[in-house]
Image (spheres, rainbow, N blue to C red):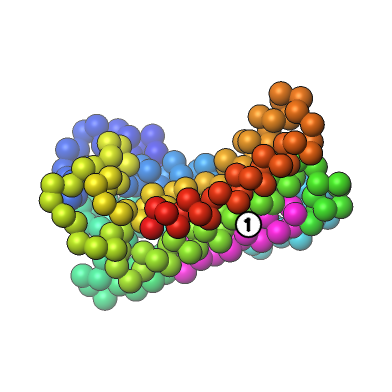
Amino acid sequence: MAALTGVAAWWDDRMLGYVGVWNKPLKFQLAMALQTATIAWALANLDERIRRLAMPKGLWLLWLAVVLFEVSYITLQGGRGVPSHFNRNTALESALGSVMAAGASVLVMTTAWVGACALWQARRNQWQPRTLAIGLGFVLGGLLAAYTGGAMGPSGYWPEPLVQPVKWMPVTGWALSQTDLRIAHFVGLHQMQWLPAVAIAGMSLRISPKAVNAVVLSFAGVAPFLVQQLM
C-alpha cells in the first residue's frame, strides 16, 4: 500500500491543510507495517508457551483486521481529500471515527499485554536484557500511546488553537512552534522499538547484562517524564 501511496503522492499535489493529501496515509501505512513487524519479532523471542498466551491466533487475526481497517480508512479519506481523525462532518464519518478509536485501543492494549508476557519470561530467565527490554518497551509503548491518544480525544492534536505563524516539521507535519500531542504520542508508542534497540546495541558491544539492564531501566524511567513534558 505504501508503494502505491508513494506514487499517488508524487502524481497528486492536492493539499489537506498544510500537507499533501497522501502524507498521512503514507505515514500510517509505514507505521502500521513497522508496528506489526515489531510485534512479530518480539513474539519470536518468547518461549512457545508464553507466545501462545501473549498472542493466540484469534488475537493475531483481530490485530491484522484492525490494522487493515485503520490504514484502509485513512487512505480512503486521504484520497477523498478529507480528514480521517476527528472528522464529524457526517454521521458515517463520526461512526467510523469511533471505530478507529476502538481499533487503536485494541492495538495499544495488545501491545501492552505482549509486553507483560515478555516481562514474565524475563523474570523466569534471570532478566535477560533483550526480553526485559521487549517487556518494558511494549508495556510502556502501549500505556503511553493510550495515554497520549486519550489526551487527543477532547481537543485534537493541539491543546490550544494554532497561533500563526506556525512552524511545521517537514515530512511529519507536526507543529513545532507550540504543543502538538502527536509528538508525545510518537515518543511514547515507539518505546516498543527504542528500548529493545538499546538492549541489542548494549549486547552487541559485549556490555555486561546487568549494565545493559541498568541502561534500559534508565531509558524506561525517562520515557514517561519526556512524554509529559511534550504534552
Magenta residues (range): 101-119
| Residue sitting nearer the eye, 127 or 89 | 127
- Residue occupying the point 38% across, 43% down: 27
Q: Is residue 163 above or below residue 15?
A: below
Residue 64 makes an appearance in the image: no
Quarter of the picture containing the N terminus is top left
Quarter of the picture containing the C terminus is bottom left
- Residue occupying the point 36% across, 42% down: 26
Q: Is residue 67 above or below residue 98?
A: above
Residue 105 makes an appearance in the image: yes
- Residue occupying the point 19% across, 38% down: 12
| Residue sitting nearer the eye, 212 or 138 | 212
> On the image, numbered disc 1 is attached to which residue?
139
User: Please, which residue is most extreme toward the bottom here?
Assistant: 91
Q: Position of residue 169 (x, y in %)?
A: 28, 39
Q: Dot 1, how many residues are within 10 Å of its Cα: few (below 14), some (14-19), or many (20+)?
A: many
Amino acid type at circle 1 is: Val
Q: Is residue 205 left or right of residue 180?
A: right
Q: Is residue 199 left or right of residue 78?
A: right
Q: Is residue 192 above or below residue 231?
A: above
